[in-house]
Amino acid sequence: MTLGLLTLSGCNSISPGPSGGSASDAGDVKSTGTQPSSDGRVYTLTVQNHDPATSICGQYVEAWGKVVEDASGGRIKFLYFHGGSLVNADGAVNAVLSDTADICWSAASIYSGQFPISEFIQLPLSGITCARMGCDVMQDMFREIPAFQAEYSSFKIIMLGSCTYAPISTTDKKLETVGDIQGLRIRAPGSTCALWCSSVGMSPLTVATPDTNDMLEKGVIEGCLNDWHNISAGKLYKNFNYIMDFPTPGSPIFMLMNKKKYASLPADLQAVIDRYSGGYASTMAGIYWDSTRAWIYDHAKEYGIEIYQPSNALYTYFTSSAVREKVHTQYVEYLNGFGLDGKAIYDKCMEIVSRYSSKYADPWDKSVSIDDFKG
């Protein structure tokens, strides 16, 4: 998406809340009714997912797909390409735009600069505590921020959401003092996480997800800010001895569909996809991604990993008002660089976060399982 598109779309304004906004949930773009209501054909849609089929991503897209297939009476079928077997992770969005894939699951942080408002979800010290909260925030952002809607104007949105948070995982070094983190070479996914890492004295590096284990084994990086699902899906736990359970927000994620493919479907099948997009798909994603934290906790001893809490001194340093102000100011400036009203967008996003602070004040008081999603 180009800056020109963002500017022409009138993206710098902020709309009123749900009672005054005209946008519905992300993904809830209703069928046009211009297609025949039913033609009896079976439509096969290709789905790109760069993570393994056994990962939470693979489980999620196939579980969502099963619901849609059943609701369509078998007239929609999905053909899954897991593990980057169709295109690499950074090619997923272009694959949808170029008709190579009909649908992709991916993370906005992979495409630094293409979805800058989405990257708010990954802004450290914003108050987002879990994937379920991030998904709720993303839904409200889409309803109320026109510039955010413009980021996805080239797609039919199925889901906008959030990974669960990313702890600080290290190979051989347990981080106990402020001095321990100075110069620490760490993988930081996305621009906003990199800003925070630099502000506290770490040395953030950009490393593609498939290359992470190799970089850990070679000592190029000493640790990662990878969320719990990524630690599991990428088998990163094999290279970790320590995980500090300090929550840096997880990546914004999405499922996007080719607009032309969606428009080519009969109206009744468009309606099926609409029914299970937006809020349904986002709520489902929040539960699925938050469930991955428990798996790592349950298997940590098996893999020789010590999970520990940051010391009071480290926690205070990580969350200081000086660090927060510096990182958040840099994010506003980052948005300004795209011709956006960064301060207005940032303020609106923070106001949306505040709506959910009480609901998700203690998101781990009960274990989270994918079985918690009831549809």
Image (cartoon, grey):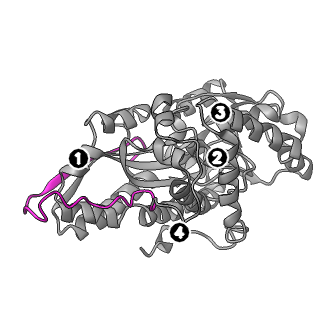
Q: Position of residue 219 (x, y in %)?
A: 66, 25
Q: Nearer the viewer, residue 62 or 358?
A: 358
- Compare marks 2 and 1 and give the one earlier in the sequence: 1
The CA span between labels 2 and 1 is 32 Å
Mark 3 lies on residue: 336
Q: Position of residue 113 (x, y in %)?
A: 55, 31
Give the residue type at disc 3: Asn
Mark 1 lies on residue: 261
Q: Is 313 on the left-hand or right-hand side of 184?
A: right
Mark 4 lies on residue: 369
- Span colored in magenta: 24-52
Q: Are marks 4 and 2 in contact (CB under 8 Å)?
A: no
The CA span between labels 4 and 2 is 33 Å
Mark 2 lies on residue: 345
| Quadrant of res 204 | top right
Q: Is 235 on the left-hand or right-hand side of 281?
A: right
Q: Quadrant of the C terminus?
A: bottom left
The CA span between labels 3 and 2 is 10 Å
Q: Position of residue 13 (x, y in %)?
A: 58, 46
Tell how many labels: 4
Helix, strand, or loop for circle 1?
helix
| Quadrant of res 239 | top right
